[in-house]
Image (cartoon, rainbow, N blue to C red):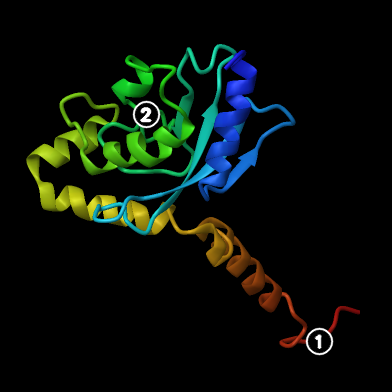
């Protein structure tokens, strides 16, 4: 590898060829979104999250910035910002790692083995330690509400606004004109 930009291109192509849906933000290769599927045999199985990836100029010598766009209930993911607390990305990153490692190893491991003793979401960590069944139920609720596969059509927010629109259209129709017209 002669330069970080060649490595960035190669890692991004490798990620795209690994059957991940990758959507570039600009013409550059520094910021993009990846559709990440919850790992099998986990509470997150069946969920699909849109993950924002930003590659620093010094990538692969400096770690990528990773964040969940749609909400996820997890002790090591900030519920509001989507930031991820993961040592291998934040502190122990090595140029030996690549983007495929992030999506095939690091993020699945994070979801399979949450660490409530180093939380970004204190509520999730406390619930996990205090009442595991309630924690698991909340994870599943978040998956149902926020992590639907995008190819099923519009997101739940879009569906509800479309339903409201169609109800409004029905209500504003001329089928029920009551009373006499104004003179």
- Badge 1 density bin: few <14, some 14–19, many ≥20, Cα 10 Å: few
Q: Secondary structure at mark 2?
A: loop
Camera-side residue of 68 and 80 = 68
Q: Position of residue 85 (x, y in %)?
A: 32, 25
Q: Nearer the viewer, residue 35 or 92?
A: 92
Q: Secondary structure at mark 1?
A: loop
Q: What number of labels is visible?
A: 2
Going by the image, does 129 lie left or right of 42? left
Query: Residue reaching furthest front?
Result: 1
* Image coords of residue 171 (percent x, y): 67, 76
Q: CA distance from mark 2 to mark 1?
A: 63 Å
**183 above or below 38?**
below
Per the rendering, the mark at residue 93 is none
Residue that carries the numbered disc 1 in the rendered image: 180
Question: Residue at position x 56%, y 62% from top?
Answer: 151
Residue under the point 56% across and 45% down: 17
The reply, left or right, for residue 48 in relation to residue 25 is left
Apparent side of residue 70 relative to residue 22 in the rendered image (left or right): left
Instruction: Spot the residue most to the right.
Output: 183
Provide residue 109's location: percent of width, then percent of height. Answer: 27, 38
Label 2 packing within 10 angstroms: few (<14), some (14-19), many (20+): many
The image quadrant where one finds the C terminus is bottom right
Name the residue located 29 percent from the left edge and 27 percent from the top edge.
120
- Give the mark, 2 or 1, whose residue is nearer the N terminus: 2
Q: Nearer the viewer, residue 146 or 152?
A: 152
User: Residue 94, located in which quarter of the rendered image?
Assistant: top left
Q: Which residue is mark 2?
A: 84
Q: Nearer the viewer, residue 24 or 96?
A: 96
**Which quarter of the figure is the N terminus placed in?**
top right
* Residue 153: % across, % down: 58, 65
- Residues at marks 2 and 1 touching, judged by CB atoms closer than 8 Å: no
């Amino acid at each position: 590898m002669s330069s970080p930009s060649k490595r960035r291109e190669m890692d991004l192509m490798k990620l795209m060829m690994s059957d991940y849906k990758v959507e570039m933000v600009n013409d550059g290769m520094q910021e993009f979104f990846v559709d990440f599927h919850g790992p099998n045999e986990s509470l997150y199985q069946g969920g699909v999250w849109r993950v924002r990836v930003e590659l620093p100029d010094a990538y692969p010598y400096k770690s990528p910035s990773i964040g969940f766009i749609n909400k996820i209930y997890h002790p090591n993911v900030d519920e509001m910002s989507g930031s991820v607390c993961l040592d291998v990305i934040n502190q122990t990153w090595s140029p030996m790692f690549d983007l495929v490692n992030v999506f095939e190893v690091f993020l699945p491991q994070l979801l399979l083995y949450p660490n409530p003793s180093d939380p970004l979401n204190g509520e999730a960590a406390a619930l996990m330690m205090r009442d595991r069944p309630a924690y698991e139920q909340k994870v599943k609720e978040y998956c149902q509400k926020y992590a639907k596969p995008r190819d099923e059509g519009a997101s739940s927010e879009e569906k509800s606004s479309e339903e409201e629109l169609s109800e409004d259209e029905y209500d504003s129709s001329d089928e029920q004109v009551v009373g006499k017209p104004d003179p």
